[in-house]
Image: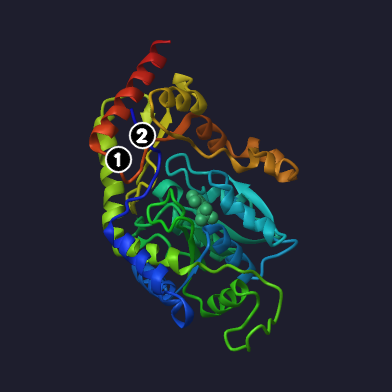
Amino acid sequence: MERIPVAGPWITDREVAYLSDAVRTAWYGDANRYQLRFEEAFKTYVSRRYAIALPSATSAIHLALAGLGIGPGDEVIVPEATSIATSAPIGYVGATPVFADIDPQSWCLSPASFESCITPKTRAVIVVNLYGGMPDMDAIDAIADRHGLAMIEDAAESVGAEYRRRRAGSFGAASVFSFNGSKTVTTGEGGMLLSDDETLYRRALVLRDHGRTPSSKAFWNQEVAFNYRMSSLQAALGLAQVERVNELVERKQQIFGWYREALDGVTGVTLNYAGPMVVNAYWMVTAVFDPRLGLGKEAAGKALSDDGIDTRPFFYPLSSLPAYAKLPQAREAASWNRNAYDISPRAINLPSALSLTRSQVGYVCERLGLLLRRQQAA
Ligand SMILES: *Cc1c(COP(=O)(O)O)cnc(C)c1O
């Protein structure tokens, strides 16, 4: 029997056609055609003034931080529950990540914890729209404003999500998306930096192009910077995907609906939350097990894997990772960031690939239901 994948794209003839065209024609003086079209289409979808296609969301966060002038001696606050891709770039610019707790319902940054992490060194906060959900943007925005902090929105997982009818990716000084193979819109690997701030946009353009200003003569670099361009092949794939974005997002929401229905009446499991102001894009259907079950994420993942079902563990709290073991704040974070440390050990991402069928979701829910009942009986 074929394994049920945890994530994966939906590719049609449109993607294949654009990609074939790009690989044949997008060279020489025409080499940027697909990047420009992809940036235009994506920023229109999100409602942002500027967009820059990049090799990854990681590089987009790096450029946002560097473009905002954040560096050594500065602190940047991030939620515990996210990919290290959110926090790693803070280290790239020589600044220090500070880990804040998550809200127990949305699993996104807790406004109160964010505020309690602010020190005179804090320069910015990176909010994360976890698994397609949204944080309490109004509260976070107000706190950031009051303290004069820049907000960066890590919208990598949330294409299609909305908060108060505003699309994910339209918040803060800058926002980023990821198009890696597991994401709703994919280019294989890829990312996008978006902003409404022309100064930040122009600065990011220079930084991604080896410190070359658009007006400078060839090979006349003003400073040492980065090489962060997306290829036309990736952009062609991305353009085809963004032209189908509504279909992709609706499919994610449909998959979540199948799970919700199939798990209706099953006790001991909580799925993704969408607050009254939120449209959740359900990038990853996520199951949090009732603590009374004593069912850990690794045990659950193993049991489902034995049934041919691929899952992912909920993100480990960043402060618990060996990568941050030397950071003094990380050692204290476990006792402060109670929600992240409580939820993470008992939550998993269920299969959410765009190729899933309703009967595959039915099978996953049947096996999961059985696992929960066995656990209850134990
Ligand atoms: C996928 C992801 C990223 C990283 O994206 P890359 O394009 O692989 O760099 C960043 N943040 C979050 C929340 C993600 O899920």
Relative side of 4 to 136, left or right: left
How much space separates mark 1 and mark 2, taking CA atoms?
A: 8 Å
Q: Is residue 291 visible?
A: yes
Residue bearing the label numbered 1 = 356
In this figure, which colouring scheme has been used for the structure? rainbow
Considering only vertical position in the picture, is 157 above or below 149? Answer: above
Badge 1 amino acid: Leu
Q: Is mark 2 within 8 Å of ligand 1?
A: no
Q: Quadrant of residue 221?
A: bottom right
Badge 2 amino acid: Ile
Residue 228 percent location from the top left of the image: 58, 67
The residue lying at 27 percent from left, 58 percent from top is: 13
The residue closer to the viewer here, 63 or 305, is: 305
The residue closer to the viewer here, 119 or 327, is: 327
Relative side of 91 to 314, left or right: right
Query: First in sequence: mark 1 or mark 2?
Result: 2
Q: Residue furthest top?
A: 378
Residue bearing the label numbered 2 = 4
- CB atoms of marks 1 and 2 within 8 Å: yes
